[in-house]
Amino acid sequence: MDTGLFIKDNFRFSADAATSMYSQLAAFIRHQIKLGVFSPHDRMITENELCELLNISRTTVRQAMNELLEEGLIVRQRGKGSFIADKKINRKLNSLYHFSDSMRELGVNPHSVVLQCDVIDADDDIAAKLNLPQSQRKVFILRRIRFGDDTPLLIETTCIPYNLCPGIEHTSFETHSLYETLKSQFGLDIVHATENLEAIIISDADARHLQCADRITVGYRIDRISYLDNGFVFEYTTSVTRADKCSFRIDLFSAGSHASRLRVGFSRELNARD
């Protein structure tokens, strides 16, 4: 796609708009990316070319491009210019999300390959994470490779106390959603979760599942503990993803006049395409 030609033929500033010129330009490009008109890896017209094409200042163009860059919609490559970025998953830590729903919102087809779907005796570590009593150590374990279209994004291992979901191991989780099954069949619904993140060297076995190139061994491990509305732990999940498929952002708001907005927002971004 010739992004410059498309912008020339289809974009016009609105003189009556309440929004700034740079916001109008950023909104137009953002919309084309979401529609799929501009595809991942398409070369973005240069800032100088945009200035001449639209007869606007470099400051206006730079502000629009920076906005798209901060949103992860474009990427800059030193010596080559700017390009449309891979589609990504964005999520806030303080907003519970479902992998499949997030992928569909991006127009990406989510699916899974099940590596393990079984009932096991929890080891001491898993039992401690799930607060299991000694007399009830059975857990349902589900281990899957999660895909966006044909790209493996992460390996996810979930453990749930089996007494909360007896018989769940007979469900096909290559075609069924785990959370929808837990909610519809067992009345279990997440209301709160915590996550811990650490950088890791991906094991050889996981690297093969994630189709890592030989040079890519660095990744992230994300541990998640989820709670029911009664405060009981019902899920312990670990996810492993490649570092080139996942990035993180923290938004900080100061106290004082913004005290009511004070929060630390954490977002995970997974590249859905190579």
Image: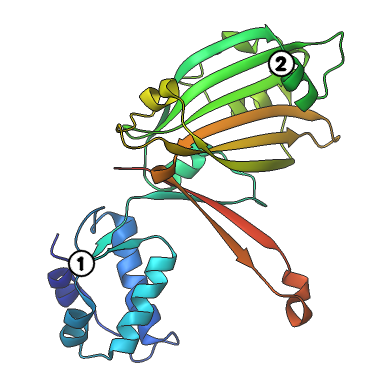
Q: Which mark is residue 165?
A: 2
Q: Nearer the viewer, residue 32 or 213?
A: 213
Q: Quadrant of the C terminus?
A: top left
**Picture layout, residue 35 above or below residue 19:** above
* Mark 2 nearby-residue class (10 Å; few <14, some 14–19, many ≥20): some
The residue shown at (23%, 54%) is 41
| Residue underneath mark 1 | 79
Q: Which mark is residue 11?
A: none
On the picture, is 7 further left or further right than 243? left
The residue shown at (43%, 63%) is 71
**Picture layout, residue 112 above or below residue 82:** above
Which amino acid type is shown beneath numbered disc 1?
Answer: Gly
The quadrant holding residue 167 is: top right
Task: State how many labels appear.
Answer: 2
Q: Nearer the viewer, residue 240 or 60?
A: 240
Q: CA distance from mark 1 to mark 2?
A: 55 Å
The residue shown at (66%, 42%) is 196
Q: Is residue 14 visible?
A: no
Q: Nearer the viewer, residue 118 or 249?
A: 249
